[in-house]
Image (spheres, rainbow, N blue to C red):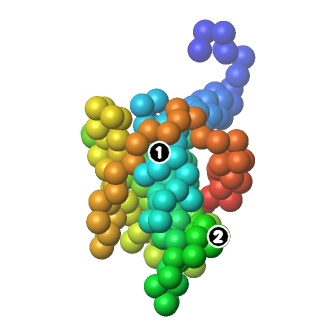
Amino acid sequence: MGHCWWISAPGRRTVLLACMLSWHAAVAAADVLPAHLTGSWGTAESLYDGESGQSQMHLDADGYGVMVGSTPRPQRIDGKNDAGPEVHAVIGFPLRATLDGTTLTARVVALDPKDAEKARRAETTCRYEAMGPTLTCSGPGRKPVVMKRLSETVPAEIARTLQQVRSMAP
């Protein structure tokens, strides 16, 4: 405080408080995920691959991400496979991931406060395996899903979505 002798004691407290708050904001914006976990992960190259449903997870270094899944291709009731259109329903949700040791935990981001309790119960945990590399993820009542690394970065459209999620997240 040698150079701030001209700031009064209450002023010094204000300056100190401002520095502490700005430091807290910088820490909150810091990366929470290491580079080997960020990017895109999936059970297949595309959500539309194959007859079965697929899963993808896209993660940014700050922990924000998106989980996306597709349904299996519908089957005709009469059992005929007429090679019709490859129709898959696709749904996704925003998430916030944290890392505790070797466990990645992804929680749904509730953009509407009335959905907060439901979002807290929808938690996915993943285990990273460097050989591959793969993420093996499971959630309540679901069997484990193994996703391989698709990209070290998220696609541009996912990056735009994550920017919107950040601006709306509580």
The residue pinned by badge 1 equals 41
Q: CA distance from mark 1 to mark 2?
A: 26 Å
Q: Nearer the viewer, residue 14 or 131?
A: 131
Image spot of residue 140 (x, y percent): 31, 70
- At 50% across and 39% down in the image, what residue appears? 150
Answer yes or no: is residue 93 visible.
Answer: no
Residue type (three-letter) at the residue carrying disc 1: Trp
Q: Nearer the viewer, residue 20 or 132?
A: 132
Q: Residues within 10 Å of mark 2 (few under 14, many from 20)?
A: few
Residue 9 horizontal side relative to residue 70, left or right: right
Cβ atoms under marks 1 and 2 closer than 8 Å: no
Which numbered disc covers residue 85?
2
Residue 160 horizontal side relative to residue 39, left or right: right
Image spot of residue 106 (x, y percent): 42, 55
Q: Secondary structure at mark 2?
A: loop
Q: Nearer the viewer, residue 70 or 109?
A: 70
Q: Quadrant of the C terminus?
A: bottom right
Chain-order first, disc 1 or disc 2: 1
Q: Quadrant of the N terminus?
A: top right
Judge whether 3 appears above or below 44 on screen: above
- At 64% across and 42% down in the image, what residue appears? 155
Q: Quadrant of residue 83?
A: bottom right
Residue type (three-letter) at the residue carrying disc 2: Pro
Which numbered disc covers residue 25?
none
Residue found at the far top of this picture: 2
Q: Nearer the viewer, residue 28 or 144?
A: 144
Judge whether 56 appears above or below 159 on screen: below
Q: Residues within 10 Å of mark 1 (few under 14, many from 20)?
A: many
Q: Quadrant of residue 133?
A: top left
- At 61% across and 9% down in the image, what residue appears? 2
Image spot of residue 34 (x, y percent): 43, 32
Q: Secondary structure at mark 1?
A: strand
